[in-house]
Amino acid sequence: MTYLLALDQGTSSSRSIVFDALGRVVAQAQLELPQIYPQPGWVEHDPEEIWRTQLATAREALAKAGITASQVQALGITNQRETTVVWNRRTGLPLHHAIVWQDRRAEPTCVALRERGLADTIQAKTGLLVDAYFSGTKLKWILDNVVGARQQAANGELAFGTVDSWLIWRLTNGAVHATDVSNASRTMLFNVHTNQWDAELLQALDIPASLLPTVKPSSALYGEVAPDLLGHAIPIGGVAGDQQSALFGQACFKAGMVKNTYGTGCFMLMHTGGNFQTSHNGLITTSAAQTAPTPEFAIEGSVFVGGAVVQWLRDGLHAIQASGEVQALAQSVPDSGGVIVVPAFTGLGAPYWKPDARGTITGLTRGTSVAHIARAALESIAYQSAALLQAMGRDVADVGGATVSELRVDGGACINDLLMQFQADLLGIPVVRPAVIETTALGAAYLAGLTVGVYQNTDELTDLWRSERRFLPTLDRPRAQELMERWEHAVRQTVL
């Protein structure tokens, strides 16, 4: 048997999964990762805890699989993107807690960048909007606010990385400081056209180049896991940010292919091949996972509240006792009875970008029940995702691109059949759920397998991809359009 090990380091947990060469899950292990909230709007992780939990799950997954590290052909890493770690090169100790992607403390720096007229330059070079979401401004905050950090950086004593770089450093006992293009593209410091760190952007944020990791394709040899950690050296052969890894795991290798991950939020990516496409519809451009030095791109949209709306039904409204009960409750009524829930609990993300929006429930009548609200809450996930795909469609139409033929789905909420059927009805195209929904980790495993020759090319991976179910649209298009218009009307009501 051929085995691949994927490390999946996320915001709320660290996981490790052992796959066989056919992409099937052999064993997995998971540990929660504590969140740290120093003050409102700030979110941190302990980098040592990231490392501890990730290493522990790797050891546990191997034990559950009944194999040793010597039987693993390669290891891949996928990670929460934008989360920022700075550490001392000599001691390996973190300088500060990791600043998590959700953290908003760097917004004043973003305001200053916009006021200096740099927003268009940054978008042209990086594909990103100026926002505290991305790593570069978080790194600047650490250098400006941790005592002695600027001097240590000037002396070449510090290393910066996203979570993948931190894990690579620890896995190799400090021998390798590297990242991949997909993670580098989320820093606001990386020119995605040249696949190089950008001197002008580094200067704009006053960041010394000596801090930065070497950037490699997503499928490349990064080094070897130190033998004392897992019992045997394993080649590190694949690295990609979680959403780009999921796009790869879904075998979306060609322009026009789209995946949507239904997690706490929703993340939709459309592969655009070698075409760097600036969105005019509220999306961002990002580097796709790459198997060669040649740049490849995707356009991306993020929904802030996806599956989290089910947690709100459980913990806020107490409409259900457990998240798994939501489908039965929603199906106890034939439709939402005209109720629309817009879960703008923390504003609205793409394609609206309304940070001041607040959640609303509209269409209430005396006949409205908690089941109607539950169904409308579930449908809100599909409405927001449909708005993303429509925005992508407009972007693609701008450059004469092909229309999307299907949506591939993954993430925890995609197991909800009612939600997936409503998604297909709104979009008017098939929604396809794969046999393996752990596509984020699978993408990392595939990237690693390509590096060491388990797979010869992406055509092999395309042949391995299997659908578990195809949800075909049953709603006529005028009715679907009417529903989307009602949704957009409800969105307009979320801003006072």
Image: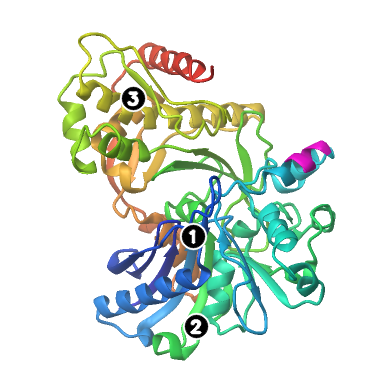
Relative to 26, residue 273 above or below = above
Residue 408 x, y percent position in the rendering: 40, 42
Q: Earlier in the sequence, mark 3 or mark 1?
A: 3
Regarding residue 429, the answer to whether it shows in the image is: no
Q: Nearer the viewer, residue 61 or 133?
A: 133
Residue at (48, 27) in percent of width and height: 387
Q: Amino acid at mark 3?
A: Asp
What is the spatial separation of the Cα atoms under label 2 and label 3, in whole angstroms? 47 Å
Please identify the quadrant where the C terminus is shown.
top right
Residue at (81, 58) in percent of width and height: 206
* Residue named by callout 1: 458
Q: Amino acid at mark 1?
A: Thr
Answer with left or right where residue 312 lies relative to residue 55: left
Q: Secondary structure at mark 3?
A: helix
Regarding residue 109, the answer to whether it shows in the image is: yes
* Residue named by callout 2: 225
Residue 348 x, y percent position in the rendering: 51, 31
Q: Secondary structure at mark 2?
A: loop
What is the spatial separation of the Cα atoms under label 2 and label 1, in whole angstroms? 25 Å
* Residue named by callout 3: 425
- Overall secondary structure of the magenta section: helix
- Per the rendered image, the range of residues in magenta is 111-115
Please identify the quadrant where the N terminus is shown.
bottom left
Q: Is residue 113 magenta?
A: yes
